[in-house]
Amino acid sequence: MFRREMPPEETRSGWLIRMNDEGVAPDTAGDGFLERVEPWPADALRLGYWHDEPVAVSVEAGDADANTTPWPAAREWLATISPAYSELLATALQVVRWARDHRFCGRCGHETRRRLHEFAMQCDHCGLRGYPRISPCIITLVTFGREMLLARSPRFPPRRYSTLAGFIEPGEAVEAAIRREVMEEVGVNVGRVSFFKSQSWPFPHSLMMGFFAEATSRRIQIDGVEIADAAWFLPERVPELPPVYSISRQLIETHRGAVATR
């Protein structure tokens, strides 16, 4: 449905996503965020093709009009749209941030320009080419038999618990990152790990790789910095969980479904 192939430079109309610092604009019907626009705004960033028609994103200054309802935040959209629309919106969010943050060369400081046929910013002074940043992360549901190890970050809403997550360090294998993060955050050794699925997480530019990990013991020792609390939970008695569209929630529900059928 969404194809990452740049429309020709002269393409100036088609589908458009409008956003500002607060949210993403609904379409005229109010049930989506894609609108047919001709011509696109001059600063529109081409993203590719949506159902074989060109699609772009534009960023508007300031908030939505004070006399209108504020635009829904990107997280609100992701909670209600299909995976295909989520992929398109995640791409738009990350490309907008990348274009804003890479207007100047990180090597020589000169202004960069967008290349026509790919997501790349070119410095014509020193030749450095910059691509959108993607930060690989692991997100892991640690289990011990039927039990799930869930934790609270100090940044979470009250009473919410989730799976463990962290960034992969330079030179680190994915499996090593899982074992390091789990040990650092909750003091638990894990044995076998198995891949679940991945999810783009555009807040701001992560690629979440989901895993199940089997703990070798139930003893917990939280770090007290990134983790405020952690505990083992039975599938029938869980705390407040992350939103259903998150890979964290999908890990939890997959485990709950698996143990319920045994």
Image (cartoon, rainbow, N blue to C red):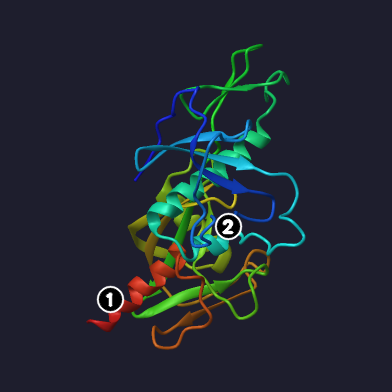
Q: Is residue 41 above or below residue 219?
A: above
Q: Secondary structure at mark 1?
A: helix
Viewer-nearest residue: 243 or 227: 243
The residue tagged 1 is: 258
Q: Check disc 2 and give the amino acid type.
A: Ala
- Which callout, 1 or 2, points to the residue nearer the camera? 2
Q: Residue at x 44, y 28 (%)?
A: 7
Query: Label 1 amino acid?
Result: Ala
Rendering quarter of residue 260 = bottom left
Could you say where residue 130 lies in the image, as x and y percent from the top left? 57, 26
SS state under label 2: helix
Q: Position of residue 223 (x, y in %)?
A: 63, 67
CB-based contact (under 8 Å), mark 1 and mark 2: no
Q: Residue at x 50, y 74 (%)?
A: 150
Quick one: 35 or 98, which is closer to the camera? 35
Q: Nearer the viewer, residue 98 or 127?
A: 98
The CA distance from mark 1 to mark 2 is 31 Å
Quarter of the image with the C terminus is bottom left
Say the numbered circle drawn on residue 92: none
Q: Is residue 82 visible?
A: yes
Residue 253 location in percent, x, y? 37, 74
Report crowding for label 1: few under 14, some 14 to 19, many 20 or more residues within 10 A (C-alpha). few
Residue 28, quarter of the rendered image: bottom right
